[in-house]
Image: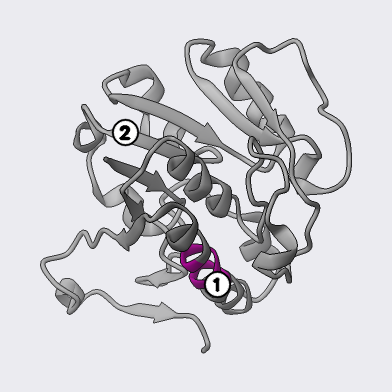
Amino acid sequence: MDWYILGSGPTVGMFPPSFYDNKNVVATNLVAERLGLYERDECLTLLTHSHYHAETYELAEKYPNYMFWTPKGDRGFEGSPGRTDLKNVFHYPHKPTSFDFTVDDAKPDNMTGLIVGSTSVHGSMHLACKFGATYGILVGVDCGAIDGKFNQAGYESGNLVTSDPLEWVTRWELHLRQVSNWLSQEYEVRFCSMNPYLNLNLEGHTWVGAKL
């Protein structure tokens, strides 16, 4: 079963919303709203995962017919759910981690838990696995810049605005490999990324990636 996992990188905005019609999708943070997927209401399944309580609750109130996952502790830190009145929000158990984490330290003990990593995408990948993904197709999990843009139009990460972008994307790149390897072994799922161009030559666009 294919599941599409949407990040906020610039390539996610290069596919029209209609591409996700009749597809299983896990959207990360605010991406589904920015793409208009809730109001379009054409996905076969549309789930949303975010580390952030405030944006999760705002989306859950606005789109009560959709399900949202967020850690018990805001941003994955220690803590309790901020709100328990929203029936379409699932607060999952997790181990608290820092931006520099190891997969072994972050693996949840509880069967209903999700991994909390340095980006919400890790939990989105884990959620797709729990819903039976055979292939996890990453869209907009770019870990780099296309034509100088690290995010889709109109979407900015606070981390990238206030610090060295390449430092963050390098961290995300390394952690993405670790999380992908663990999930692939744990759930027998294969992850790959979707390229919006004809091939890896990028049709004349410029790419700046992680400092590995």
At 36% across and 43% down in the image, what residue appears? Answer: 133
- Residue segment shown in magenta: 175-181
At 38% across and 56% down in the image, what residue appears? Answer: 188
Q: Is residue 93 above or below residue 195?
A: above
Which of 2/201 is in front? 2
Q: Is residue 179 magenta?
A: yes
Question: To which residue does mark 2 refer?
Answer: 24
Residue 73 is labelled as: none
| Few, some or many residues within 10 Å of mark 1 (<14, 14–19, 20+) | many
Which of 186/195 is in front? 186
Q: Earlier in the sequence, mark 2 or mark 1?
A: 2
At 48% across and 49% down in the image, what residue appears? Answer: 125
Quadrant in the rendering for residue 170: bottom right
Distance Cα–Cα, label 2 vs label 1 = 26 Å
Q: Secondary structure at mark 1?
A: helix
| Few, some or many residues within 10 Å of mark 2 (<14, 14–19, 20+) | many
Amino acid tagged 1: Val
Residue 169 is labelled as: 1
Q: Is residue 41 above or below residue 36?
A: above
Amino acid tagged 2: Asn
Q: Position of residue 31 (x, y in %)?
A: 46, 40
